[in-house]
Image (tube, helix red, strand yellow):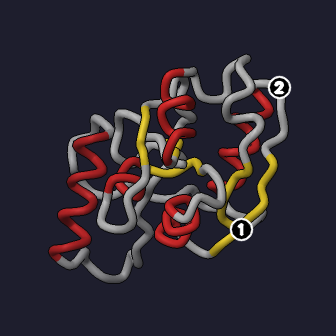
């Protein structure tokens, strides 16, 4: 099951078949039992996606029944498409190439974890890394200048 949030990087919820329309009509992780009763597919328990899913479910008062753990978003999508469960995915993973899954917006999408760029101070950024830095700075409201230095410690 796959659902999508407005930002292509934000976590989303995916659905398949009749579950898709039923879950998309209700607010995901709401007081209705639609998603609560579904098996979930997720990354390993030590992943950030797992923490986002369990945190979002806890905020709605339930513990997701994670029946399948796998190694990456593409394999989550494959398991969802096979009808083995529902998942929290980024819109880009839910709507990208691969097996068809139903996608619906989340009523209250979880916040996306921070994204950053780590580099060696001893070398200038290569053009691709510089373009990524400029994109991060622009989307975060920055100027695109030099990367911020980590605090000494």
Evaluate whether residue 14 shows in this view.
Answer: no
The x, y position of residue 129, in whole percent, is 25, 71
Residue 35 vertical position relative to residue 33 in the rendered view, above or below? below
Q: Image quadrant of residue 80?
A: bottom right
**Element type at marker 1?**
strand
Q: Pointer 2: what residue?
A: 61
- Identify the residue at image location x=72%, y=43%: 38
- Identify the residue at image location x=34%, y=46%: 8
Q: Image quadrant of residue 66?
A: bottom right
Q: Seen in the image, is 91 located left or right of residue 128?
A: right
Q: CA distance from mark 1 to mark 2?
A: 22 Å
- Mark 1 Cα within 10 Å, few/some/many (few <14, many 20+)? some
Residue 105 vertical position relative to residue 93 in the rendered view, above or below? above
Q: Seen in the image, is 127 located left or right of residue 87?
A: left
The x, y position of residue 51, in whole percent, is 72, 50
In the rendered image, the residue lying farthest to the top is: 31
- Identify the residue at image location x=18%, y=63%: 131
Marks 1 and 2: CB-CB under 8 Å? Answer: no
The x, y position of residue 16, in whole percent, is 50, 48
Evaluate whether residue 27 shows in this view.
Answer: yes
In the rendered image, the residue lying farthest to the front is: 18
Q: Pointer 1: what residue?
A: 69
- Mark 2 Cα within 10 Å, few/some/many (few <14, many 20+)? few
State which tag comes first along the sequence, 1 or 2: 2
- Identify the residue at image location x=43%, y=58%: 116
Q: Image quadrant of residue 118?
A: bottom left
Q: In the image shown, does 27 or 120 lie closer to the viewer?
A: 27
The x, y position of residue 1, in whole percent, is 54, 48
């Amino acid at each position: 099951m796959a659902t999508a949030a407005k930002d292509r990087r934000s976590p989303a919820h995916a659905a398949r078949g009749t579950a898709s329309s039923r879950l998309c009509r209700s607010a995901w992780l709401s007081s209705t039992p639609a998603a609560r009763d579904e098996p979930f597919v997720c990354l390993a328990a030590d992943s950030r996606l797992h923490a986002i899913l369990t945190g979002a479910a806890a905020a709605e008062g339930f513990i997701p029944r994670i029946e399948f753990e796998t190694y990456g978003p593409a394999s989550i999508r494959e398991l969802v498409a096979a009808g083995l469960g529902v998942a929290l995915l980024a819109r880009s993973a839910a709507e990208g190439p691969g097996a068809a899954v139903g996608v619906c917006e989340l009523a209250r999408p979880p916040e996306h974890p921070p994204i950053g760029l780590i580099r060696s101070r001893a070398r200038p950024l290569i053009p691709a890394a510089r373009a990524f830095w400029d994109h991060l700075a622009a989307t975060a409201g920055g100027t695109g200048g030099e990367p911020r230095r980590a605090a000494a410690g």
